[in-house]
Image: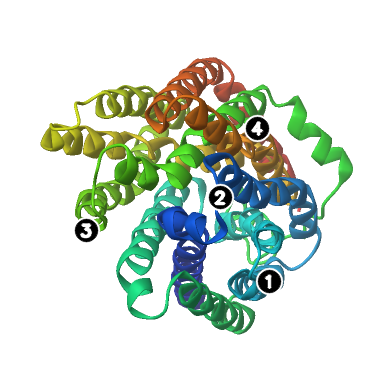
């Protein structure tokens, strides 16, 4: 690899890291603002669920469209457009003054939330299979760090500068700035450039999207298990993201400062879990193609166990609650980078955005309604019941789906490598 290309790929990682950090801050900080926003608009838990489900539904519907566009056109320019849309829709969300308008504008922020497949596939063309887990783990550090930054902005900065609307104006403006950086400094790479079979080639053919290859995605048995775990696996994240702060404040009696000092370390541990999961997955992948799946299955099983222990901890046992939440945070993200890398371990380069977008579409098709379901259960019983029930059931299902993938990954990976070798031989 040339020094120029090696340098360029790290520039891309840095820019994408800040894109994800600030975008996730903008997306996730609303969970920390549930109480003031609900009080301003007079919302119940169910109405709050609709506010968050609206953006998820929009993102779900647009995943196939973004995936198709990324496989057909320049991914860097489309990502710049996504960042521009992020900035504009967040500004609109801060301007409106009624519940219906807030519902509509919040839903519009989902347009750019479905833009990640292009980012991940572009990274896959800069880094080979043995490094992807680590790189995705580094990038996904931005998600919990964005959550933490959003929490700080919502709980500490917002009251000092005029409330939650001012924070939306800040993060919306940052979206516009990031769009400029992506447009001018992120360059596209030929699809498949980092595959081992093409690594030493000075020139390589351009792989173009084809419907025939897109159909092949659904013939990979591993992808079916990936789709199934995706459908179930995002439920817990949406439940925790949009309701956990209200649970801490209303049902466990935490003050805002106590929430910050409790959840801050938990989120930092969560951030480390993304990289640990990707790095350990890459390491095991060198010895067995089942490595990423093994790590993913362990993550969902142990995450579910420790979250249940935390939620059932007595209110007065705050130290015990904190310890169990820290342990939950270690295991929750282990599967994330490994699932993305697994998709690219079994699909050809020219349809990877479509494959990833399909997986996200299926994820959100179920999880888009997680906030609504959580709100309904919480209004009927309690937030504790909702947070205990939904993650336990859905992560249990994920564990079973990962067990199925253990029996299919070797063949699907070998088929892809044979296909890439055949292409390299014919160039």
Secondary structure under badge 3? helix
Say which residue label 1 marks: 85
For residue 196, say whether it is visible: yes
Occupied quadrant, residue 324:
top left
Location of residue 206 in the rendering, given as x and y in whole percent from the top left corner: 77, 60
Is residue 172 left or right of 335 when viewed as pictured?
A: right
Mark 2 burial class by Cα count in 10 Å: few <14, some 14-19, many 20+? some
Q: Residue at x 58, y 43 (%)?
A: 49
Mark 4 burial class by Cα count in 10 Å: few <14, some 14-19, many 20+? some
Is residue 401 left or right of 383 when viewed as pictured?
A: right
- Of badges 2 and 1, the one in the foreground is 2
* Viewer-nearest residue: 292 or 81: 81
Mark before the other along the chain sequence, 1 or 3: 1
Mark before the other along the chain sequence, 3 or 4: 3
Secondary structure under badge 1? helix
Mark linked to residue 366: 4
Say which residue label 3 marks: 257
């Amino acid at each position: 690899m040339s020094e120029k290309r090696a340098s360029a790929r790290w520039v891309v990682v840095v820019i994408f890291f800040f894109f994800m950090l600030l975008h996730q801050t903008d997306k996730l900080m609303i969970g920390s603002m549930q109480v003031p926003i609900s009080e301003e608009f007079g919302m119940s838990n169910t109405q709050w669920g609709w506010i968050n489900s609206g953006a998820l539904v929009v993102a779900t519907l647009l995943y196939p469209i973004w995936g198709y566009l990324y496989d057909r056109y320049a991914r860097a320019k489309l990502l710049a457009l996504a960042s521009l849309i992020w900035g504009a829709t967040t500004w609109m969300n801060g301007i409106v003054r009624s519940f219906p308008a807030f519902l509509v504008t919040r839903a519009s922020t989902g347009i750019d939330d479905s833009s990640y497949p292009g980012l991940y596939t572009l990274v896959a063309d800069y880094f080979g299979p043995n490094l992807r887990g680590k790189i995705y783990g580094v990038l996904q550090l931005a998600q919990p760090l964005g959550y933490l930054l959003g929490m700080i902005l919502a709980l500490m900065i917002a009251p000092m500068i005029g409330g939650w609307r001012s924070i939306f104006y800040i993060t919306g403006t940052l979206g516009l700035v990031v769009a400029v950086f992506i447009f001018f400094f992120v360059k596209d790479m030929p699809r498949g450039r980092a595959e081992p079979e093409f690594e030493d080639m000075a020139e390589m053919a351009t792989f173009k999207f084809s419907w025939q290859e897109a159909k092949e995605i659904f013939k990979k048995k591993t992808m079916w298990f990936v789709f199934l775990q995706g459908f179930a696996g995002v439920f817990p994240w949406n439940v925790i993201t949009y309701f956990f702060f209200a649970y801490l404040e209303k049902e466990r009696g935490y003050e805002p400062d106590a929430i910050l000092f409790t959840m801050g370390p938990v989120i930092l541990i969560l951030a480390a879990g993304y990289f640990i999961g990707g790095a350990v997955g890459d390491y095991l992948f060198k010895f067995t193609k089942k490595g990423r799946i093994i790590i993913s299955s362990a993550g969902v099983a142990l995450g579910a166990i420790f979250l249940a222990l935390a939620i059932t901890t007595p209110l007065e046992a705050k130290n015990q609650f904190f310890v169990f939440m820290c342990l939950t945070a270690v295991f929750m993200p282990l599967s994330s980078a490994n699932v993305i890398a697994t998709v690219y371990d079994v699909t050809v380069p020219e349809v990877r955005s479509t494959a990833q977008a399909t997986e996200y579409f299926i994820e959100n098709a179920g999880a888009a309604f997680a906030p609504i379901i959580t709100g309904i259960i919480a209004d009927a019983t309690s937030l504790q019941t909702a947070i205990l029930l939904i993650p336990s059931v859905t992560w249990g299902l994920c564990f079973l789906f990962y067990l199925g993938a253990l029996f299919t990954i070797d063949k699907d990976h070998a088929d892809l490598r044979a296909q890439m070798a055949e292409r390299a031989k014919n160039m």
